[in-house]
């Protein structure tokens, strides 16, 4: 089971980075997949947090401390590297990316992640109590937020929710779905019923159908574009189910896949700093794309390992200090 989760997390990061390369691809349309990648990432975050919460029961304040300190420490390392010699930019990056300070930041990755971390204990408790009802309630509330005007959060010409609330609601629902998928034991069911191949074809059909309707709405029925919000949730769940129905062996590359998957959050953070540097250079296609992917994964991995090692030394120090 864990192998598929690692693979899917790397796939999400590849899509996210690709969506930010529209200035580098010769055809801008090739920079696709960001919305899908973010959705998969948030769903896996919910699933992964529920999984780790089952394995290691931590007091709520200690759980918050571990999660927040780990991400903030990685951010400070990234800013120290890319902003070396420029203290003004270093402070600005801290203020913009770490501190939730303005409305537009609802569409920023990290402030949304902070919100999901804060909500996780409540979401987990409701998930264990209600399971599917939690998804229904979240979707129902989001429908009204999408369907009706909210002052300051709606694109006036189209009367549709602006990108910030769209991003935040999408992240919340994918996160909730991920937690519920874990608590509903659906993955265990897929493994126990491994001989039921009809599950694979059913969800493959659901994936293609949701994407077909999605494209049809974009091309012919823009007045119903808010429906694509729900189609995206369907597509992500279908991909999540399908990945567990596909048998593949990553043993020859297990350590690499494991390290990249665990470094995915650091890669997510560092790629936002690497892409502008490569864009400002004179490096031509396709070398610029290769460099972005290579450097993002290399530096993300190094930052993850360094921050984990530092936190490990801190834990060891506290242990011997208590003795």
Image (spheres, rainbow, N blue to C red):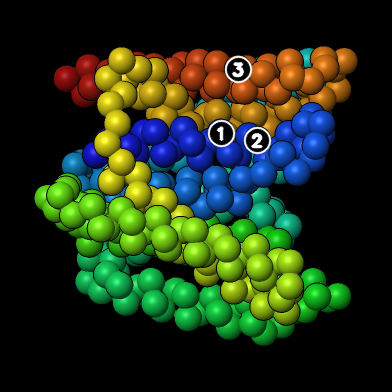
Q: Give above or below for 219 relative to 279.
A: below
Residue 72 image offset from top left, x and y in percent:
53, 34
212 to the left or right of 309 = right
Q: Residues within 10 Å of mark 1 (few under 14, many from 20)?
A: some
Q: Please, what secondary structure does the residue beneath circle 2 have?
A: helix
Which is more N-terminal, label 1 or label 3? Answer: 1
Residue placed under numbered mark 2 in the picture: 18
Q: Which mark is residue 142?
A: none
Q: Is residue 161 left or right of residue 319?
A: right
Tell me if residue 150 can be seen: no
Helix, strand or loop for disc 3: helix
Distance of mark 3 from mark 2, alpha carbons? 13 Å
Q: Is residue 287 left or right of residue 59?
A: right
- Label 1 sits on a secondary structure element that is helix
* Label drawn at residue 14: 1
Q: Nearer the viewer, residue 244 or 12?
A: 244
Q: Residue at x 20, y 41 (%)?
A: 56
- Badge 2: how crowded within 10 Å, few (<14), some, or many (20+)? many
Q: Residue at x 46, y 41 (%)?
A: 68
* In-front residue for pair 83/255: 255
Q: Position of residue 239 (x, y in %)?
A: 41, 51
**Label 1 with label 2: CB-CB less than 8 Å:** yes
Q: Position of residue 153 (x, y in %)?
A: 73, 71
- Looking at the image, is 148 positioned above or below residue 268? below
Relative to 196, 219 lies left or right: right
| Residue bearing mark 3 | 294
């Amino acid at each position: 089971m864990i192998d598929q989760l690692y693979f899917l997390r790397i796939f999400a990061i590849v899509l996210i980075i690709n969506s930010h390369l529209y200035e580098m691809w010769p055809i801008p349309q090739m920079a696709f997949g960001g919305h899908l990648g973010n959705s998969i990432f948030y769903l896996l975050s919910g699933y992964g947090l529920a999984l780790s919460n089952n394995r290691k029961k931590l007091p709520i304040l200690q759980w918050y401390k571990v999660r927040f300190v780990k991400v903030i420490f990685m951010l400070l390392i990234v800013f120290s590297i890319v902003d070396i010699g420029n203290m003004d930019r270093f402070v600005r990056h801290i203020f913009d990316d770490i501190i939730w300070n303005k409305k537009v930041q609802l569409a920023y990755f990290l402030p949304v992640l902070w919100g999901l971390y804060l909500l996780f204990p409540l979401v987990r408790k409701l998930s264990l109590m209600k399971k599917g009802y939690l998804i229904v309630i979240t979707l129902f509330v989001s429908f009204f937020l999408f369907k009706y005007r909210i002052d300051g959060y709606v694109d006036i010409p189209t009367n549709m929710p602006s990108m910030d609330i769209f991003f935040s609601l999408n992240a919340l629902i994918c996160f909730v779905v991920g937690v519920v998928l874990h608590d509903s034991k659906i993955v265990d069911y897929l493994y126990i019923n491994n001989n039921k191949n009809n599950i694979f074809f059913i969800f493959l059909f659901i994936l293609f159908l949701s994407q077909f309707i999605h494209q049809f709405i974009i091309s012919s029925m823009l007045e119903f574009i808010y429906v694509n919000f729900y189609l995206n949730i369907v597509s992500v769940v279908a991909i999540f189910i399908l990945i567990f129905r596909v048998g593949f062996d990553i043993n020859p590359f297990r350590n690499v896949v494991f390290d990249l998957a665990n470094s995915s959050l650091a890669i997510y953070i560092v790629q936002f700093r690497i892409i502008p540097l490569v864009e400002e250079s004179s490096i031509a296609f396709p070398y610029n794309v290769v460099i972005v992917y290579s450097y993002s994964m290399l530096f993300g991995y190094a930052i993850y390992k360094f921050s984990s090692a530092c936190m490990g030394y801190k834990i060891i120090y506290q242990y011997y200090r208590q003795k």
